[in-house]
């Protein structure tokens, strides 16, 4: 953002609800709206001072005010109980007598308080929540330390966008003040930034390709291993089947041998027995009736 104290702006403030979307938007540095690409920067608020609604002094709220028993007009410094009477009263600060409202940063009382607050935050950035960054208005930067931002020293992974902060002081007390309309970047820097953006894209694509290749190789390896183990399993099954078949074959042939031996012997014995018996009967009966049956 390139806001100044006097020029108009084409800046649009977008508030994001999703932290991840916010980060990816800032890290990409661009947003596409209706076929146009726009530059994106983080808006960093300047530290605001809590000012009492009753006495117009900084550092406490109306609820805890011990400075006044009634609401003081920030314009004229009078009793503001009748609000209607203070719509167009004379502006004269009741803190310092200056020609500004009592709650304005132009007032030394408010401004000194704010300066002290910024100093405290600079010295103790760990008191800020990890995701909070604050912008230091130029008037509040000291000569030695030109830092434009305060951010928490606590660990927070917010990506690379934090370094690219480039924000100017927007004067809140000047109702005419608008941030700059001037194009923030010239053609040269545009082509350079497009170039670097392209380089970034190429790099990230190359990286992705590499990743895909790696995972492809890994998957191929897994498939190979699976294939090999399948083949081994099939071979083993085949060997087992063959062994089974062989055993069966042996068993059958053994059985055949056994059966034929037994059957032959038994059959022979039975035949002999019958022959002997019939012969005996024949002799006993003196008959030739069985001669045809027994040969
Ligand atoms: Zn007060
Ligand atoms: Zn007044
Ligand atoms: Zn004042």
Image (cartoon, grey):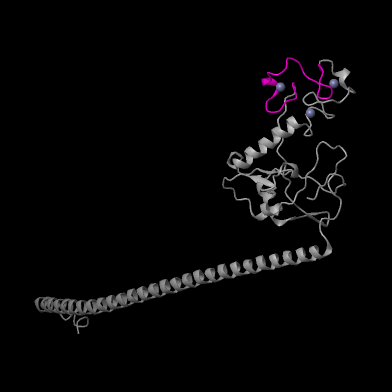
Q: Is residue 258 above or below residue 29?
A: below
Q: How far across and how far down the image is residue 110, in percent?
A: 74, 31
Front residue of this view, candidates 19 and 255: 19
Q: Is residue 151 above or below residue 72?
A: below
Residue at 83%, 64% in the rendered image:
187
- Which quadrant holds the C terminus? bottom left
Residue at 58%, 41% in the rendered image:
126
Look at the image and say whether residue 65 sits in the magenta stretch: yes
Residue at 77%, 66% in the rendered image:
192
Front residue of this view, candidates 272 and 220: 220
Q: How far across and how far down the image is residue 130, in percent?
A: 60, 43
Q: Residue furthest bottom?
A: 295
Q: Is residue 131 above or below residue 182?
A: above
Q: In which quadrant of the rendered view does residue 66 lie?
A: top right
Residue at 69%, 68% in the rendered image:
202
For the record, the magenta segment spans 54-80
Q: In which quadrant of the rendered view does residue 289 lie?
A: bottom left
Q: Is residue 183 above or below residue 288?
A: above
Front residue of this view, candidates 190 and 12: 190
């Amino acid at each position: 953002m390139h806001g100044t104290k006097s020029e108009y702006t084409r800046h649009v403030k977008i508030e994001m609800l999703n932290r991840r979307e916010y980060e990816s938007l800032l890290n990409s540095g661009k947003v596409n709206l209706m076929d146009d690409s726009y530059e994106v920067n983080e808006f960093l608020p300047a530290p605001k001072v809590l000012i009492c609604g009753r006495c117009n002094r900084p550092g406490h709220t109306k609820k805890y005010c011990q400075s006044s028993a009634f609401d003081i007009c920030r314009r004229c410094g009078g009793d503001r109980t009748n609000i209607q009477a203070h719509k167009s009263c004379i502006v004269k600060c009741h803190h310092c007598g200056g020609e500004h409202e009592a709650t304005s940063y132009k007032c030394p009382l408010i401004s000194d308080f704010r300066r002290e607050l910024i100093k405290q935050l600079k010295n103790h950035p760990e008191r800020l929540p990890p995701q909070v960054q604050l912008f230091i208005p130029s008037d509040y930067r000291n000569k030695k330390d030109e830092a434009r931002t305060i951010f928490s020293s606590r660990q927070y992974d917010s990506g690379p966008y934090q370094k690219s902060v480039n924000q100017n002081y927007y004067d809140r007390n000047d109702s005419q003040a608008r941030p700059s309309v001037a194009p923030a970047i010239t053609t040269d820097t545009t082509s350079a930034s497009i170039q670097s953006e392209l380089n970034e894209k190429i790099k990230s694509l190359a990286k992705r390709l590499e990743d895909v290749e790696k995972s492809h190789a890994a998957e191929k390896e897994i498939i190979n291993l699976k294939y090999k183990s399948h083949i081994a399993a099939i071979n083993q099954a085949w060997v087992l089947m063959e062994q089974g078949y062989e055993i069966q074959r042996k068993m059958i042939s053994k059985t055949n041998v056994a059966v034929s031996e037994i059957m032959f012997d038994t059959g022979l014995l039975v035949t002999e027995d019958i022959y002997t018996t019939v012969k005996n009967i024949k002799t006993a009966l003196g008959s030739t009736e069985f001669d045809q049956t027994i040969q």
